[in-house]
């Protein structure tokens, strides 16, 4: 803000000062401020931007609180399954070996996975970390983001929530832009 204030005092437009700091002032805000400067209604536009960002923050908070419980349950589920593979399955393995029974295919697969986790933890942990990092990198690519978004929109719990959130953000932004004299085609 100090930098923007210095620019404005030196004769620059407020929107130009904002554009020098894209990490703080997004393109929407810069365009709205520029429209306010041109139309002479900067005070009204800044007030509407304040309302817009308050509504957006409230919506984001509601989404975070709505998804907090499923995320917690998912994380707890991963911990429980890891605990089963590390502590419980080896106990059953020793019991099965004691009696020398032929095991079904799925039981053998579970024991093999458990052995891999317990015996080769020094490979398993970096492999899981690498897989997570690769997933995050893939999701940041345009094709990965599109694929992930399609997947999320099809999920039973999160799909409708993400869709409603996106539509809400779109309509709030469009409403704010059109109210402030930006044409519909430019707003879209």
Image (cartoon, rainbow, N blue to C red):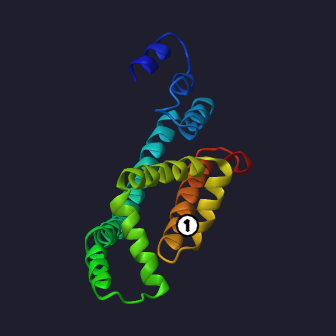
Element carrying mark 1: helix
Could you tell me how many numbered marks the image carries? 1
Q: Is residue 53 above or below residue 10?
A: below
Q: Position of residue 145 (x, y in %)?
A: 61, 54
Q: Position of residue 188 (x, y in %)?
A: 69, 51
Q: Residues within 10 Å of mark 1 (few under 14, many from 20)?
A: some
147 with respect to 129 (left or right): right
Q: Residue at x 57, y 52 (%)?
A: 139
Q: Residue at x 52, y 22 (%)?
A: 17
Q: Residue at x 49, y 84 (%)?
A: 105
Q: Position of residue 74 (x, y in %)?
A: 36, 69
Q: Nearer the viewer, residue 145 or 126?
A: 126
Image quarter in which the N terminus is found = top left
Within the image, what quadrant is residue 182 found in?
top right
Q: Residue furthest top?
A: 10
Q: Position of residue 102 (x, y in %)?
A: 42, 89
Q: Residue at x 42, y 69 (%)?
A: 113
Within the image, what quadrant is residue 108 found in?
bottom left
Q: Which residue is mark 1?
A: 152
Q: Nearer the viewer, residue 18 or 61?
A: 61
């Amino acid at each position: 803000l100090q930098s923007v204030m210095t620019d404005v005092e030196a004769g620059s437009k407020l929107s130009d000062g904002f554009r020098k700091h894209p990490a703080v002032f997004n393109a929407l805000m810069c365009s709205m401020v520029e429209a306010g400067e041109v139309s002479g209604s900067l005070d009204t536009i800044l007030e509407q931007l304040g309302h817009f960002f308050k509504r957006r923050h409230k919506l984001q908070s509601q989404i975070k609180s709505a998804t907090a419980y499923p995320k917690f349950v998912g994380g707890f589920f991963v911990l429980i399954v890891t605990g089963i593979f590390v502590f419980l399955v080896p106990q059953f393995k020793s019991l099965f070996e004691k009696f020398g029974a032929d095991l079904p295919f799925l039981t053998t697969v579970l024991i093999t996975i458990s052995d891999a986790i317990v015996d080769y933890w020094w490979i398993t942990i970096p492999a899981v970390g690498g897989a997570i990092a690769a997933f995050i990198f893939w999701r940041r690519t345009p094709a990965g983001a599109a694929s992930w978004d399609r997947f999320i929109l099809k999920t039973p719990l999160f799909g409708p929530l993400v869709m409603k959130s996106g539509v809400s953000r779109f309509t709030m932004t469009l409403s704010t832009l059109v109210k402030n004299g930006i044409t519909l085609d430019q707003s879209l």
